[in-house]
Each structure stands twice: as C-alpha cells, then as structure tokens.
Image: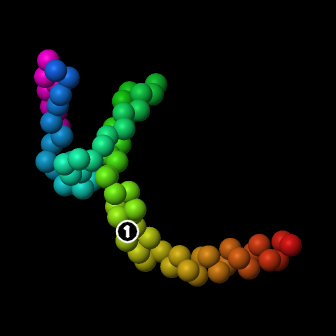
C-alpha cells in the first residue's frame, strides 16, 4: 500500500491497516528510525484495554504455577 505525504507532513493510514491493528481516532503512533528504515507502531489510548484477551488460549495460569515450582526447586 502506498500513501502520499501532504506539504504539512500529513498522510493517511489505509483503512485495511487501521482495521487490522485496531487503530482508532485519538490513538498515538510511535515512529522508530533504524538502519533498515522507519517503523510505525500504533499506541492505543487505553493500553490495558487493548491487551485484553491477548493471552487467550495460552494457559497462562498453568505456566505461572510451573514457573513457581521451578523457582522453589532452585531455592
């Protein structure tokens, strides 16, 4: 996808990308410059709300219990 930058330095985020990454009005963008180019990372207004459901299906409570057992064994 390609967009154009206006003389005021503005551009449009294509709707497919906005939908895929749930970018909404008021969200911020972080611009990272690196040796391979520029990366843009969306930052939602409510970061905690955006993380909700990200660990679904990961069996996180079981992993936590296993990590605690491993810690006890090391002590």
Q: Position of residue 30 (x, y in %)?
A: 36, 38
Horizontal side of 48 relative to 7 (left or right) equals right
Of all residues shown, which one is farthest toward the right? 75
Rendering quarter of residue 11: top left
Q: Position of residue 72 (x, y in %)?
A: 80, 77
Secondary structure mostly seen in magenta is loop
The answer to whether residue 9 is magenta is: no
Residue 3 drawn above or below residue 57: above
Instruction: Give the quarter of the figure containing the C terminus.
Output: bottom right
Q: Which residues are magenta?
A: 1-7
Q: Could you say which is closer to the camera, residue 74 or residue 36?
A: 74
Rendering quarter of residue 12: top left
Q: Could you say which is closer to the camera, residue 36 or residue 56?
A: 56
Horizontal side of 31 relative to 59 (left or right) equals left
The residue at which mark 1 appears reads as 52
Q: Residue at x 40, y 62 (%)?
A: 48
Q: Residue at x 13, y 48 (%)?
A: 15
């Amino acid at each position: 996808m390609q967009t154009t930058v206006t003389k005021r330095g503005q551009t449009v985020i294509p709707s497919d990308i906005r939908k895929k990454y749930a970018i909404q009005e008021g969200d911020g963008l972080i611009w990272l410059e690196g040796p391979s180019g520029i990366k843009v990372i969306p930052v939602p207004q409510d970061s905690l709300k955006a993380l909700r459901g990200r660990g679904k299906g990961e069996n996180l409570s079981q992993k936590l219990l296993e990590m605690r057992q491993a810690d006890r064994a090391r002590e």
